[in-house]
């Protein structure tokens, strides 16, 4: 009965989101390095590309040095990925310095899909109370990086298969460059906190950046594709995928932007896995599957289970349960 009540609540909260658009399916080969030219079945070409990319993921997520601009609060720099939308090519992050900091500790905060400019600001300030400086990153195609044609951050998660790969890679490269800036400022112990889509990106970042000491993953899944296929928040994306690609193929194509292949790369870090019992957006069986993989591969981790759903995590008292768990973990391990 409790599960039914939470699931009904989750559906009502999800229905409050406006401007969801069913966009056309596209393989998006022009977004994928090396696939713009050439002939052959797009599905087979993308699958072969994904298999090869997994073998050289360190190159796929490699960064070059960047030039930064910082006004004491707002950090900007050119993204490592150039997209057709000028607004999206400048990375924006806001710094929330911890008062009376005794150690140089910082957390890169990666909010959820469709977070507005104020999303996770409260969490950044809570991190400050734990003596942690927070750098809140705006994800690609979010808030100030969103072109006028969009009302939602549709280009980072969509039925355009290649573009979804490219923009999630862009998010990881942006995160790595932000971490490099923190390191340049003298921060000696750096963590990453990611929520929902941000949790996937946080693990990818941690797996490919040796500067990250600890990561807190808030709402989790081993596969990118399965969340899109089964989740409540992405039913409109699934509508375009149906009939054009099957889940097994999509899972394989999107494996380079999925957490599962990279667990061995976070073996030497501290990881917190947070999931919710009544989550319909990151379905419970997917969250438990990732926890099971951490256990079976003997990757060190801690787990926190929230007695709520995905959307209701942002409602009192659950947001405090979640936020305190995230901040305590990062404060202990940084």
Image (cartoon, helix red, strand yellow):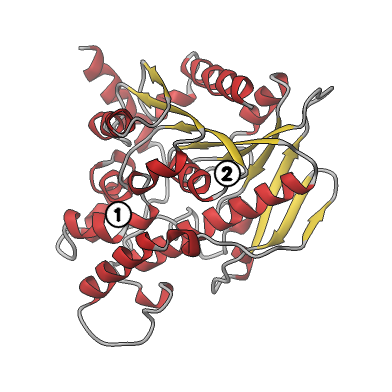
In the image, what residue occupies the spot 40% across and 62% down?
165
N-terminal-most mark, 1 or 2: 2
The picture places residue 194, in percent across and down from the top left corner, at 51, 37
Q: Is residue 141 visible?
A: no
Could you tell whether 3 is left or right of 147 in the image? left
The quadrant of the image that shows the C terminus is top right
The quadrant of the image that shows the N terminus is top left
The picture places residue 9, in percent across and down from the top left corner, at 32, 24
| Disc 1 packing (10 Å; few <14; some 14–19; many ≥20) | many
The label shown at residue 247 is none
Q: Which of 21 and 257 lies nearest the eye of the viewer?
A: 257
| Disc 2 packing (10 Å; few <14; some 14–19; many ≥20) | some
Q: Is residue 258 above or below residue 270?
A: below
Could you tell whether 53 is left or right of 270 in the image? left
Q: Is residue 324 above or below residue 133?
A: above
Q: Residue furthest bottom?
A: 38
Question: Residue tagged by mark 1?
Answer: 237
Q: Is residue 287 above or below residue 1?
A: below
Q: Which of 224 and 52 lies nearest the eye of the viewer?
A: 52
Q: Which of 268 and 33 lies nearest the eye of the viewer?
A: 268
Quadrant hosting residue 39: bottom left
Q: Which of 191 and 266 lies nearest the eye of the viewer?
A: 266
Question: Residue tagged by mark 2?
Answer: 116
**Label 2 secondary element:** loop
In the image, what residue occupies the spot 78% across and 26% down?
103
In the image, what residue occupies the spot 66% across and 30% down?
124
- Determine the CA span between mark 1 and mark 2: 20 Å
In the image, what residue occupies the spot 41% across and 24% down?
312
**Label 1 secondary element:** helix
Could you tell whether 86 is left or right of 41 in the image? right
The picture places residue 2, in percent across and down from the top left corner, at 25, 12
């Amino acid at each position: 009965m409790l599960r039914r009540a939470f699931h009904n609540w989750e559906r009502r909260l999800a229905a409050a989101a406006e401007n969801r658009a069913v966009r056309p399916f596209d393989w998006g080969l022009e977004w994928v390095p090396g696939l713009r030219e050439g002939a052959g079945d797009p599905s087979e070409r993308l699958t072969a590309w994904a298999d090869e990319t997994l073998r050289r993921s360190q190159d796929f997520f490699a960064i070059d040095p960047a030039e930064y601009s910082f006004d004491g609060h707002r950090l900007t720099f050119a993204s490592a990925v150039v997209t057709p939308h000028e607004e999206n090519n400048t990375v924006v992050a806001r710094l929330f310095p911890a008062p009376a900091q005794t150690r140089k500790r910082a957390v890169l905060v990666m909010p959820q899909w469709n977070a507005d400019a104020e999303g996770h600001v409260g969490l950044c300030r809570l991190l400050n109370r734990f003596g942690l400086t927070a750098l809140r990153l705006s994800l690609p195609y979010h808030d100030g990086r969103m072109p006028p044609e969009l009302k939602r951050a549709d280009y980072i998660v969509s039925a355009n298969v290649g573009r979804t790969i490219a923009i999630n890679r862009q998010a990881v490269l942006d995160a790595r460059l932000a971490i490099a800036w923190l390191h340049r400022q003298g921060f000696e112990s750096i963590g990453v906190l990611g929520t929902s889509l941000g949790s996937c990106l946080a693990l990818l970042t941690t797996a490919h950046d040796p500067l990250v000491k600890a990561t807190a993953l808030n709402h989790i899944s081993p596969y990118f594709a399965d969340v899109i296929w089964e989740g409540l928040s992405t039913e409109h994306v699934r509508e375009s995928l149906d009939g054009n690609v099957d889940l097994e193929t999509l899972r394989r194509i999107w494996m380079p932007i999925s957490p599962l292949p990279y667990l061995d790369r976070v073996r030497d870090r501290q990881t917190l896995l947070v999931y919710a019992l009544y989550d319909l957006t990151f379905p419970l069986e997917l969250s438990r599957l990732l926890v099971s993989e951490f256990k079976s591969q003997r990757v060190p981790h801690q787990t926190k289970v929230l007695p709520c759903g995905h959307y209701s995590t942002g409602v009192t008292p659950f947001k405090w349960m979640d936020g305190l768990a995230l901040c305590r973990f990062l404060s202990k391990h940084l």
